Amino acid sequence: MSNVAQSLIGERGAVIPQVYGSNWLLRVLSSIAGTPLFPCPYGPERFVITRLEQPGDTHGWHWDDYGFALVWVAEVPDPVDGGFVESVPDTSWDKQRPGIEEILRSRRVHRLDLSGGDVYLMRTDTTLHRVHPIRRGRRTIVNMAFARHDELCRPTTHETMDALWSTPRTE
Ligand SMILES: O=C(O)CCC(=O)C(=O)O
Ligand SMILES: [Fe+2]
């Protein structure tokens, strides 16, 4: 799996930062979510480009640090080769004891098949989710994170980022 970090996209990219900063987009997403959404207060989590390309590459089971993610799917293998999204809604992240195995044993796992060009919005703080490991092909997405109002000021640790980048961060 390879990632292009927010800082690099911010420095060299034009379209992604512009789309992310669009008030129109925020209004549309807020109306779909049924709650006002805001740019993520923690810069490094605002947007990331992620590519899976080796057999077995996955984005393993996790919750995100903020409430919503908008995922733009640039390319994805045929669903028979993996790359679809699996999720368990209405689950919460106990950071001391995530209990992921127990949730997977006892709850129905939903599946979302994707095609290149799809965009989806997910409630990511209360939805356990992962990308099913790919068997072949390549999967490239842009993930944009958005926060609810109550997430703007609260102190937050950034476990999801830490797992991606292996650098401890707290704000
Ligand atoms: O690639 C996807 O569809 C979801 C990615 C994801 O869950 C994340 O980046 O936190
Ligand atoms: Fe996620």
Image: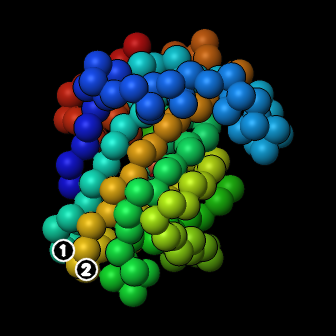
Residue 51 locus on image (x, y percent): 27, 54
**Mark 1 or 2 closer to N-term?**
1
Lateral position of residue 170 relative to residue 26, left or right: left
Residue 25 locus on image (x, y percent): 67, 33
Q: Residue at x 34, y 43 (%)?
A: 49
Q: Secondary structure at mark 2?
A: loop
The numbered mark at residue 55 is 1
Q: Specify the quadrant of the image occupied by residue 34.
A: top right
The amino acid type of the residue labelled 2 equals: Arg
Contact, CB < 8 Å: mark 1 with mark 2? Answer: yes
Q: Residue at x 16, y 68 (%)?
A: 54
Q: Quadrant of the C terminus?
A: top left
Residue 17 locus on image (x, y percent): 45, 25
Name above or below for residue 166 compared with residue 98.
above
Name above or below for residue 79 compared with residue 61.
below
Name above or below for residue 97 compared with residue 61.
above
Residue that mark 2 sits on: 135
Q: Residue at x 51, y 49 (%)?
A: 71
Q: Residue at x 31, y 72 (%)?
A: 133
Residue 39 locus on image (x, y percent): 58, 23
The numbered mark at residue 120 is none
The answer to which of 9 and 57 lies nearer the viewer is: 9
Q: Is residue 159 visible?
A: no
Query: How many badges with numbers are in the image?
Result: 2
Q: Residues within 10 Å of mark 2 (few under 14, many from 20)?
A: some
Q: Quadrant of the N terminus?
A: bottom left
Q: Is mark 2 within 8 Å of ligand 1?
A: no
Q: Is mark 1 within 8 Å of ligand 1?
A: no
